[in-house]
């Protein structure tokens, strides 16, 4: 994971209560909207894929679907 707030550098975010494509993901520290959910989940997906690529060809992604419950838990765990 390589996401961080471009305002304060915090990796912690608050996900919108309703995961609407246009709902805003907020920075947990400075409470600024960092991206819409649509943009954020795309960023997260790319970050996860990059992590797996760095981990080497021997590891397989658990999921590349941003709506996968496991990935959402991983994101929520950072909030
Ligand atoms: Zn911030």
Image: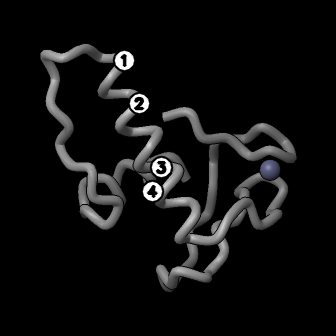
Residue underneath mark 1: 54
Q: CA distance from mark 4 to mark 2?
A: 19 Å
Which of the two labelled residues, at mark 4 and mark 1, occupies the earlier sequence position? 1
The image shows residue 76 at horizontal and vertical percentages of 45, 56
The one of 15 and 24 positioned closer to us in this rendering: 24
Are the residues at dot 1 and dot 2 in contact (C-beta closer than 8 Å)?
yes
Name the element at disc 1. helix
Check disc 1: other Cα within 10 Å, few if <14, some if 14-19, many if 20+. few
CB at mark 4 closer than 8 A to ligand 1? no
Are the residues at dot 4 and dot 1 in contact (C-beta closer than 8 Å)?
no
The one of 70 and 46 positioned closer to us in this rendering: 46
Which of the two labelled residues, at mark 1 and mark 3, occupies the earlier sequence position? 3
Q: CA distance from mark 1 to mark 3?
A: 15 Å
Are the residues at dot 1 and dot 3 in contact (C-beta closer than 8 Å)?
no
Q: CA distance from mark 4 to mark 1?
A: 22 Å
Residue underneath mark 3: 44
Check disc 4: other Cα within 10 Å, few if <14, some if 14-19, many if 20+. few
Check disc 2: other Cα within 10 Å, few if <14, some if 14-19, many if 20+. few
Residue underneath mark 2: 50
């Amino acid at each position: 994971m390589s996401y961080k707030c471009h305002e304060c550098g915090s990796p912690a975010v608050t996900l919108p209560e309703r995961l609407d494509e246009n709902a805003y993901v907020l920075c947990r520290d400075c409470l600024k909207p960092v991206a819409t959910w649509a943009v954020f989940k795309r960023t997260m997906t790319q970050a996860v894929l990059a992590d797996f690529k760095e981990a080497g060809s021997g590891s397989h992604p658990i999921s590349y679907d941003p709506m996968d419950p496991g990935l959402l838990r991983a994101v929520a765990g950072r909030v």
